[in-house]
Image (cartoon, helix red, strand yellow):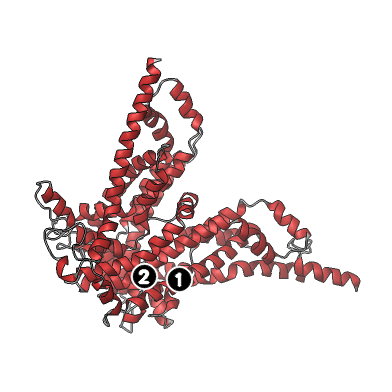
């Protein structure tokens, strides 16, 4: 009687698992309790993540029009069609161009800014505050303001150019300039994020390395070149690849600022996915585009792992 | 002696150069925010005028009054929608991911490692792959044009589980063992020991989920159709495409949508900056 009471109390409260009694009811109940912690999330995960991933592959092999009753199996036909689809290749080229340009600028520019605001100078918290501020804006707010500033006729940027005696520029209306313009707008919007990643990396460099070099008479330029940059290499690689992946998935900026134009000059892969699935209601082909995108991104991710296989361990 | 002097002089001048560069950059980065405000208080008739004025000669709130009261837009309602969805998604995500992270970090059950590997696999697959299947599912559930569609799929945030698990594994076990001796159960340990000790990570994750939901465009754009169900971000995007002749109005809308997040940022600046450095989240 007494013993049973103690056992019950123990069962209800103690967080240590009961003594090993294989197959006993108490061990089972204990384990079931553990499952309860992960159960709600795993249900959501199955419904909204893993199930849809598998279903996407299934759908991409079917002709799947949204209102049709039947979704006939067509094997790899969607993929074959994608390879011959001119719009897909244009969109892919635009997305890659935008991604490489934006990632390159952000990776280099944010590093210099981070080194600048890591120096012990007056007002550096203020600078960090200002530089990260645009990151919190939504893409729609950012797109609205930047497209107005880049307007050919009434934009304030052209106003400045004319003020300095330069000719006005068709930022968003020129086939060759539209992607660089979107890229500049995106750098304004987002460079604060890699800047903070770099600042975190810079804080990890031990001060004594700089002191030793300073005693040897190195100036601050040489400190940056010979100590900071080599030690920051893993962070730089990380920023470059994650930026590339993030900006390859560009959607909001061209949708809001140019609607893919002029012509298809800023039409991106995600816009094509959106158009195919939610304007033309071709869900099967849309999923095929999504899967193809995933493989491009997966390629970048594997590249990242390869680079990090060598770079991830840093010894100071 | 001379060497030291020269060195000091060069640091002094290089500091001034650095200050000039940073001030210039701060002005450039801050200018669009200022310009957004300036255009929004320009009377509609003067928005399309040239030459530009850096401060509107006749400032007025006309655009704001328009944007709040026009019947064909429902800005106050969109604002409310964004708030409900962002707060809801943040609360659900924090609770479920932390519970799960605790399970994976501290509890033992058969299949734990396999399940974790499945999560790992899922995080490698970019989000676009699931868009269409999840959309079809949400439609089947009758969730189009509802808050459910914007909260539950967001709460399946695998990255949050990873982040918090990593963090929880760093919490020293001695504290829990003391609590076990005091008779605390699993849930109490999670709730009263692990969560309070992980405040920094939870707040960071919470802020980023909030901002991401508030600012998300693609997903709400496809699951919301009715005018009154739109979030601010979707509403603004549609405005931008439709009201091309009413720039002042659209830009005033952008100010209204940006004010809360900028305010949130100004208040939690330190936490957000630390959060980015701690988690690597919070950007693009």
- Horizontal and vertical percent position of residue A211: 48, 26
Which SS class for mark 1? helix
Which SS class for mark 2? helix
User: Between residues A146 and B158, which one lies in front from this camera angle?
Assistant: A146
Q: How many marks?
A: 2
- Point 55% across, 67% down: residue: B96
How crowded pointer 2 is (Cα within 10 Å; few <14, some 14-19, many 20+) is rated as some
- Horizontal and vertical percent position of residue A167: 9, 50
Q: Can residue B117 be seen in this view?
A: no
- Point 25% across, 75% down: residue: A279
Which corner quadrant holds the C terminus of chain B?
bottom left
Of all residues, the one furthest to the right in this rendering is A1
Label 1 marks a residue whose chain is B
- Horizontal and vertical percent position of residue A132: 37, 52
Query: From mark 1 to mark 2, how far is it between C-alphas?
Result: 10 Å
- Point 43% across, 67% down: residue: A53
Looking at the image, residue A289 sits to the left or right of residue B48; the answer is right
Of all residues, the one furthest to the top in this rendering is B1
Looking at the image, residue A158 sits to the left or right of residue A286; the answer is left
Q: Which mark is residue B153?
A: 1
- Horizontal and vertical percent position of residue B240: 23, 69
User: Between residues B32 and A272, which one lies in front from this camera angle?
Assistant: B32
CB under 8 Å between discs 1 and 2: yes
Q: Earlier in the sequence, mark 1 or mark 2?
A: 1
Please determine whether, in this image, residue B196 is positioned above or below residue A277. above
Q: Quadrant of residue A226?
A: top left
Q: Which mark is residue A167?
A: none
Q: Which mark is residue B219?
A: 2
């Amino acid at each position: 009687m007494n013993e049973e009471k103690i056992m019950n109390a123990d069962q209800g409260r103690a967080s240590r698992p009961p003594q090993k009694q294989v197959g006993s009811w108490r061990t089972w109940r204990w384990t079931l309790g553990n499952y309860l912690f992960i159960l709600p999330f795993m249900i959501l995960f199955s419904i909204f993540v893993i199930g849809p991933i598998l279903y996407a592959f299934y759908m991409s092999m079917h002709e799947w029009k949204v209102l049709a009753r039947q979704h006939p199996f067509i094997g790899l036909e969607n993929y074959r069609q994608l390879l011959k689809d001119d719009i897909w290749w244009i969109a892919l080229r635009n997305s890659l161009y935008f991604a490489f340009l934006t990632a390159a600028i952000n990776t280099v520019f944010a590093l210099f800014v981070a080194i600048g605001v890591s120096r012990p100078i007056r007002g550096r918290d203020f600078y960090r505050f200002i530089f990260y501020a645009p990151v919190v804006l939504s893409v729609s707010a950012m797109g609205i303001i930047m497209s107005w500033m880049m307007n050919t006729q009434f934009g304030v940027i052209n106003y400045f150019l004319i003020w300095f005696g330069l000719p006005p520029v068709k930022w968003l209306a020129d086939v060759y300039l539209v992607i660089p313009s979107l890229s500049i707008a995106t750098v304004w919007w987002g460079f604060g994020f890699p800047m903070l990643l770099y600042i975190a990396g810079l804080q990890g460099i031990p001060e004594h390395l700089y002191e030793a070099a300073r005693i040897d008479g190195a100036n601050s330029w040489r400190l940056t070149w010979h100590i900071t940059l080599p030690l920051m290499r893993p962070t730089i690689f990380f920023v470059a690849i994650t930026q590339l992946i993030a900006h390859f998935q560009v959607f909001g900026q061209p949708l809001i600022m140019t609607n893919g134009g002029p012509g298809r000059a800023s039409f991106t892969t995600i816009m094509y996915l959106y158009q195919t699935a939610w304007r033309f209601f071709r869900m099967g082909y849309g999923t095929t585009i999504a899967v193809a995108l995933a493989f491009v991104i997966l390629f970048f991710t594997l590249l990242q792992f390869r680079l990090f296989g060598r770079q991830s361990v840093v010894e100071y | 002696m001379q060497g030291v002097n020269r060195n000091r002089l060069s640091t002094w001048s290089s500091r001034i150069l650095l200050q000039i560069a940073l001030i210039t950059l701060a002005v450039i980065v801050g200018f669009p925010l200022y310009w957004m405000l300036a255009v929004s208080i320009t009377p509609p008739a003067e928005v399309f005028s040239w030459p530009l004025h850096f401060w509107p000669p006749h400032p007025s709130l006309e655009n704001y009054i328009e944007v709040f009261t026009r019947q064909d837009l429902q800005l106050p309602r969109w604002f409310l929608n964004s708030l409900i969805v962002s707060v809801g998604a943040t609360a659900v995500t924090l609770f479920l991911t932390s519970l799960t992270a605790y399970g994976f970090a501290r509890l033992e059950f058969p299949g734990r490692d396999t399940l974790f590997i499945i999560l790992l696999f899922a995080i490698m697959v970019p989000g676009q792959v699931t868009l269409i299947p999840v959309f079809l599912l949400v439609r089947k559930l009758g969730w189009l044009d509802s808050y459910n569609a914007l909260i539950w799929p967001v709460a399946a945030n695998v990255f949050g589980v990873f982040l918090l698990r990593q963090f929880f594994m760093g919490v020293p076990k001695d504290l829990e063992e003391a609590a076990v001796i005091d008779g605390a159960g699993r849930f109490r340990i999670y709730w009263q020991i692990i969560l309070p000790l992980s405040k920094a990570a939870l707040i960071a994750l919470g802020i980023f989920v909030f901002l991401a939901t508030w600012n998300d465009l693609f997903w709400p754009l496809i699951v919301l159709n009715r005018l009154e169900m739109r979030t601010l971000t979707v509403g603004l995007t549609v405005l931008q495409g439709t009201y091309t002749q009413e720039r002042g109005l659209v830009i005033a809308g952008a100010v209204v949508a940006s004010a809360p997040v900028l305010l949130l940022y100004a208040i939690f600046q330190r936490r957000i900056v630390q959060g980015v450095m701690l988690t690597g989240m919070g950007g693009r």
